[in-house]
Image (spheres, rainbow, N blue to C red):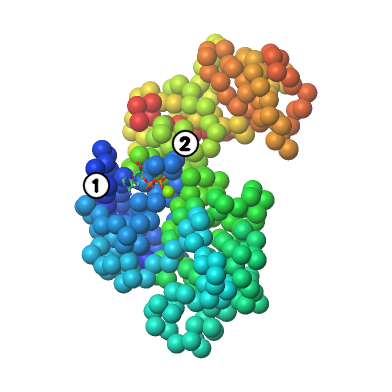
Amino acid sequence: MTASALQLARVTHRYAGAERDALSDVTLDAAPGELLAIVGASGSGKTTALRLVAGYERPDAGAILLDGADVTRLPPERRGCGMVFQHYALFPHLSVEENVAFGLEARGVARAERRTRAQRALEAVGLAGTGARRVQALSGGEQQRVALARALVIEPRVLLLDEPLSNLDPTLRVATRDELRALLHRERVTALFVTHDQEDAFAVADRVALLQAGRLLQVGTPETLYDRPASRAVAAFIGRGALVPATLANGTDAAPDVTITLGGVAQRAAARMADGLADGRAHRVLAVLRPEQLALASDAADAAWPGRVTSRRFAGGTTVHQVALDGGVTVQVASADRGVREGDTVRVRLAAAQVAVVGADT
Ligand code: ADP
Ligand code: MG
């Protein structure tokens, strides 16, 4: 087995004078060439994790390993991490090429080679031919790419990106994140990508780590976090899902059925669970009902939960209806039906064959 390109091994960090750990016993790894996202709300410890990897902070406990070597005690300049920040921190008085080559000069690379490497990095980010321009003359998206080129030019062992898309407008952000993923995979860069935006994390990363208040809640592919959340907190953070009391029964041991009874109507699906929860099938559980798994029932005779539409939001291909179900649960239902209005009495059918389930006490 090849060594992980990056490992955080039981890393804990508390800032001087702080009341709680900014990062608490976090273990994570990224394989060579892997794009790992850290996602979490503001203050969850994402930037702290990056700063620990880069060497700007020392952990109170635990270790940081790059390519299998313990770098916990090494200063930043001996770790070889490239950084891209939310505010690109470019030098406004320098040209694009000088900005990109800056880190090479500090590393003692000769002038001719600096030029060649800077030009190659600019090519890689789609900015060939812009080297002589002033950075202020570039658009926000282009400046973001200059910052990326500047980080890539040193051929970092790991690229660290802290909210790199936050300053871009929505259209540019979507285009940029697709390019970013393609570029990093093409260049086989190992990257740790930090964002508060789960959509960005899902779009860019191979795997996603979810942090909450300094603790790692779950790490896995975007599909794993969405389909098999490990806990109630993960289910509440990832996607738009209503958490609804349910019971597990029948089915097979690995995949019991989940039954959700609301307003006197029971609906059932196969349960999808994180590893380990199946053992707790006697426990109380919560079903995670997502908008695309629910439908407005066309026929009152269908076994479907009764409720009332409290609001609707047109979302292009579908309209998302918020429905207050009898039994006190509010769900969101995606439907192509545009004729349903606020205040309408409706029935909501469970349209998915499988539904994610989390332990009620997790
Ligand atoms: P995120 O990047 O996810 O928003 P941070 O890693 O910046 O979170 O912060 C995690 C926690 O550490 C927060 O509670 C924050 O207030 C605290 N914190 C961050 N930087 C410092 C600092 N330099 N000194 C003291 N506390 C800090
Ligand atoms: Mg941050």
> Does ligand 1 reach within 8 Å of label 1's beta carbon?
yes
**167 left or right of 318 in image:** left
Residue 340, horizontal then vertical, whole percent = 74, 21
**142 left or right of 49 in image:** right
Residue 164, horizontal then vertical, whole percent = 52, 56
Residue, disc 2: 237
Please tell me which residue lies in front, 185 or 109: 109
Residue 258, horizontal then vertical, whole percent = 48, 26
Helix, strand or loop at disc 1?
Answer: loop
Q: Quadrant of the N terminus?
A: bottom left
In primary-sequence order, the first of circles 1 and 2 is 1
Q: Amino acid at mark 1?
A: Ala
Figure check: 128 above or below 289: below
In which quadrant of the rendered view does residue 155 lie? Answer: bottom left
Q: Amino acid at mark 2?
A: Phe
Residue at left offset 71%, top offset 15%: 344
> Within 10 Å of the Cα at label 1, are there few (<14), some (14-19), or many (20+) other Cα atoms?
few
Q: Quadrant of the C terminus?
A: top left
**342 left or right of 353 in image:** right
Residue, disc 1: 16
Please tell me which residue lies in front, 312 or 272: 312
Contact, mark 1 vs mark 2 (Cβ under 8 Å): no
Residue at left offset 64%, top offset 18%: 310
